Image: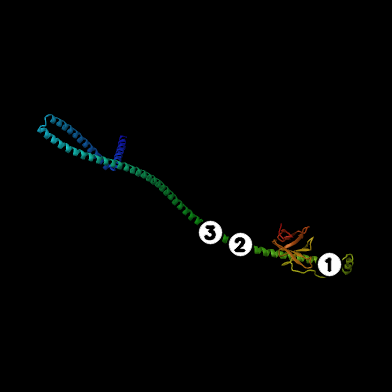
Amino acid sequence: MAKMQENWRDIIADRLRERNKNESARFADIIHYNNRLCDTAAKLRQENLDLKIDRKIRDSVNVSGAGAGGTTFGTDVAAITNAQIQSLEKKVLAQQEELTDLHKRKGEHSQMVITLNQKLTDVQRLLAEKERALAEQTALCVTLREELDEMKASHVTIKDESLASQLRANTAEDKLRAVQDENTKLLNLLMEYKSRDAEIMNKENDKFVKEKKARIESELERAIRDIPGPSSIGADLDRFDVDGLPEGVEFKFDAHDGEVNAVRWSPIERIVATGGADRKVKLWDVGKGVCEQRGVLVGSNQGINSVEFDTTGSMILAASNDSASRMWSVVDHRLRV
């Protein structure tokens, strides 16, 4: 503990000596001139004191010489004393001039000291400002270096993440290609299945149509067998107030691409609805003396088997071979249900 105390005391003493040396080195010349001025002033004061003493001696000699009646000895002493006085006066004048010069130089040096002190204060203030700015710049530099290190670390992390994302993207692209290939295969397989289903459905439709035709033909044959002879036909016709059976065709047109499976009149207009194996329901206007197509109702997946209007004639219902029923609006031909 004592050694540590002695060490810090020595450190403080060394720092004080170093500061004293640094501070006094700038004013060494001024201090030297000031010491010379003090020595010269002390010397001048001593010579002035000696001159005063010599003057008193001279005055006392002059008084004693006058009391002796002007002897030769008194005359010689007076002559010597006058020469010494003149020499001393010259020295006094020279010393006064030198003292004046020294005072002048002292004032100049004092002014120089004040100016240098002011400059030193300004330099110290500027140095303190620059040290403060340097400290701020150093702190800023440290902060920027830390941010740079963080950015480098984040850059490395982002680069790694980018590589990982690229790898994931490549893997996802490979998976997407595989899925697309599989999807293409599935689509092709689905198209094959659909074509097979269509063939099967067409076969079923053909079979259904053939069976229906056979059933109709058999019913017609039974009906023909049940019709009585000509004599009974004439008697029955007399009971009806009719002009006779139709003798010609009123309209003939191609309604559908295939068989016509259903025909229905509208209850309020002269419109005929037909449904066929082409999965369409068509409306025909027969009220103007010609047969014009009024509209086509689409949306069925299989051939139409039955067609029916509602009581208002604004909606039409159709049943198809896929065991489904659909309803359209007669006005705008849109599928409703």
In the image, is residue 121 above or below residue 64? below
Tell me the kind of residue under disc 3: Glu
Please indicate whether residue 57 sits to the left or right of residue 143 in the image. Answer: left
Q: Residue at x 52, y 57 (%)?
A: 169
What residue is disc 1 on? 225
Q: Indicate whether 207 appears above or below 125.
A: below
Q: Residue 163 appears at what percent x and percent y? A: 48, 55
Q: Find residue 5 and report its image quarter.
A: top left
Residue at the disc numbered 3: 173
**Is residue 18 visible in this depiction of the protein?**
no
Residue at x 62% of width, y 62% of height: 190
What type is the residue that disc 2 sits on?
Leu
| Identity of the residue furthest to the top in this view | 67
Asked whether residue 100 is in view, the answer is yes
Which residue sits furthest bottom? 248
Quarter of the image with the N terminus in it = top left
Residue 17, by quadrant, is top left
- In the picture provided, is 325 more to the left or to the right than 242? left
Q: Counting residues from the N terminus, which is met first, the one under dot 1 or under dot 3?
A: 3
* Mark closest to the chain's N terminus, 1 or 2: 2
Mark nearest the camera among 3 and 2 is: 3
Q: CA distance from mark 1 to mark 3?
A: 75 Å
Per the image, the residue denoted by label 2 is 187
Tag 3 and tag 2, C-beta contact below 8 Å: no
Question: Could you give the CA–CA distance between mark 3 and mark 2, rounded to whole angstroms?
Answer: 20 Å
Q: Earlier in the sequence, mark 3 or mark 2?
A: 3
